[in-house]
Image (cartoon, rainbow, N blue to C red):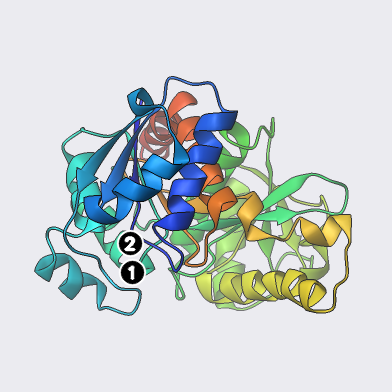
Amino acid sequence: MRIGLDMMGGDYAPAEAVKGVKLFLDSVATGVHLVLIGDEQSLSPLLADAQLDPSKYSVVHSSQVIGMNEHPTKALKEKPHSSISIGFHLLQNKKIDAFISAGNTGAMMVGAIYSIKLIEGVQRPTISTVLPRENGSQGLLLDVGINADCKPENLVQFAILGSLYSRYIMGTTQPKVGLLNIGEEEGKGNLLAQATYSLLKDNPLLNFIGNVEGRDILKDTADVIVCEGFTGNVVLKMAESFHDMAVRRNIRDEYVDRFDFEQYGGTPVLGVAEPVIIGHGISGARAFSNMILLAQRMIETKLLEKIRESFVVAGK
């Protein structure tokens, strides 16, 4: 198993990326081989100081970096030797089994869609966020930002993708799917919610339980909550603010600590044909380590094969 990691992506790269690699290799006994993509001159002293097992990683040199504020499509075209461009080239040509970056999110999305392509039958990819629930379990919310405007069919596909992720990555036996709405009763909400409800209700691949409200998000009412990316991103940023506020006010609470994004690392781009994981721009060592763990689990559980099989069924 070969996992590619963009060592130049993120505000604290490459130092925190190297620390994350060390944390992963020191704590996880696996057959994973890490392909570290970045500027060799910058990486060499950091890797030497980390005293990593040289059999567990290899370095692929990249002479360019796509900045966080660069235009995604233009940057990928004009910087073919960037760490992100090289990562997608390696993934596209089966030289690595997964690709991870905390760099330019737009460039990662463009690369995932146009270099790796979507799984047949998937209309749009989606990204999700883990929801730490009050009872100690975890839920999933999607979409959280890349699909601000959606059709009902898109939300149904997000529900299928989220259910498979919840089942095979998060270990939920029969994920309950809820539609985020302004009321529990059928017929509530805007035109999108009303049209989506009936499609979710009639889909045999889903364990649809109906509408859920904002007050249900952090409860165990539903394991997978579906919405369009505009609403999902607002919910995500508000949840992140709980943890940020607690840190600023020096408040320590076990539950609030679970809103720290580093615990979850990054989010996969669900719906593309190979494992692609996007990290937060301010990712530290623990986040990088957890992103590698997530990529490993996606490969081991054959999640993408399960998605392909489901969309074959859905298309019949």
What residue would you read off at disc 2?
Answer: 109
What number is the disc on residue 254? Answer: none
Quadrant occupied by the C terminus: top left
Q: Amino acid at mark 1?
A: Gly
In the image shown, does 28 or 152 lie closer to the viewer? 28
Q: Are marks 2 and 1 in contact (CB under 8 Å)?
A: yes
> From mark 2 to mark 1, how far is it between C-alphas?
5 Å
Q: Is residue 123 above or below residue 60?
A: below
Q: Is residue 90 above or below residue 306?
A: below
Instruction: Determine if residue 205 is in view.
Output: no
Instruction: Determine if residue 185 is in view.
Output: yes
Q: Amino acid at mark 2?
A: Met
Q: Tell whether 35 sits left or right of 139.
A: left
Residue displayed at 56% across by 44% down? 290
What residue would you read off at disc 1?
Answer: 106
Secondary structure beneath dot 1 equals helix
